[in-house]
Amino acid sequence: MNWLSHVFLSKASIEYQLGNLLADPLKGKCWQGASAHTQEGFKMHRRIDAFTDSNSFFRRSKSRLGERGYLKGVVIDIAYDYLLLKNWDTYSSIDKVSFLQAFYRDASIAITDYPSDAKLFAQRIIQSKILSHYSTIEGLLTTFERLDTRLSKRILSKDNTVSYFPSLKREIDDIEQDFLFFFPLMIDHFKQESGLQLDGHWFKQ
């Protein structure tokens, strides 16, 4: 799953959300002195990714982009964030604008004492408001273009994300159907793995 999904699939704690978000850029290594909720978020990130990678609906979405491709999983991760935004009211009792505003506000306060690498990444997410960039299909293309500029020459020699956009656009309706089967399963998995108490949470009950 991509950044927005990790923030959404979290307990109602900004530290937990940030841990879930930061696990990827920090390569799964939480810093010494991080709060218990931050450490929980780091662990949950791995569980979410493991569930996603093994799920048949997610694998079906990847197959819709062709038989081969080094970055198909990355493209579908980002596309699923777009589809989460598109279908937001199905899964959340809080509107997406309010959810994201609260996350950006609370995260900007929480990261004050974070290590520099964690703080810089989180600040980039907050300042760019990137979690809402996937709200249109055109926004996905812009995201892919930006992502490709950050890929190493080694990866670019194998693949790039922009090249998948025509196939993604053509297959998006079927990929959305995969997502609509997948995401409720993902929410149930998160609830079970986290021991989530739903009181005060944004999941629609």
Image (cartoon, rainbow, N blue to C red):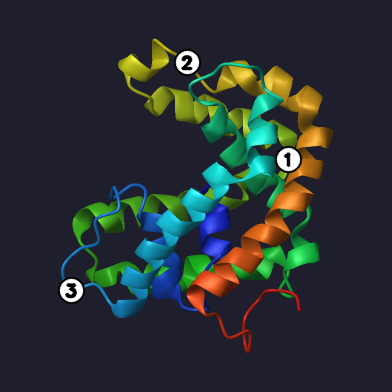
Relative to the observer, which residue lies in front, 184 or 157? 184
Q: Tag on residue 136? A: 1
List x then y, in percent, for residue 17: 46, 67
List x then y, in percent, for residue 44: 43, 63
List x then y, in percent, for residue 102: 55, 72
Q: Is residue 6 left or right of residue 109?
A: right
Query: What residue type is disc 3 on?
Result: Gly
Frontmost of labels 3 and 1 is 3
Q: Is residue 64 above or below residue 46?
A: above
Frontmost of labels 1 and 2 is 2
Q: Residue 107's quadrant in the figure? A: bottom left
Q: Tag on residue 33? A: 3
Q: Check disc 1: other Cα within 10 Å, few if <14, some if 14-19, many if 20+.
A: some
Q: Which residue is mark 2?
A: 159
Q: Residue at x 58, y 73 (%)?
A: 191
Q: Residue at x 39, y 50 (%)?
A: 124
Query: What residue type is disc 1 on?
Result: Thr
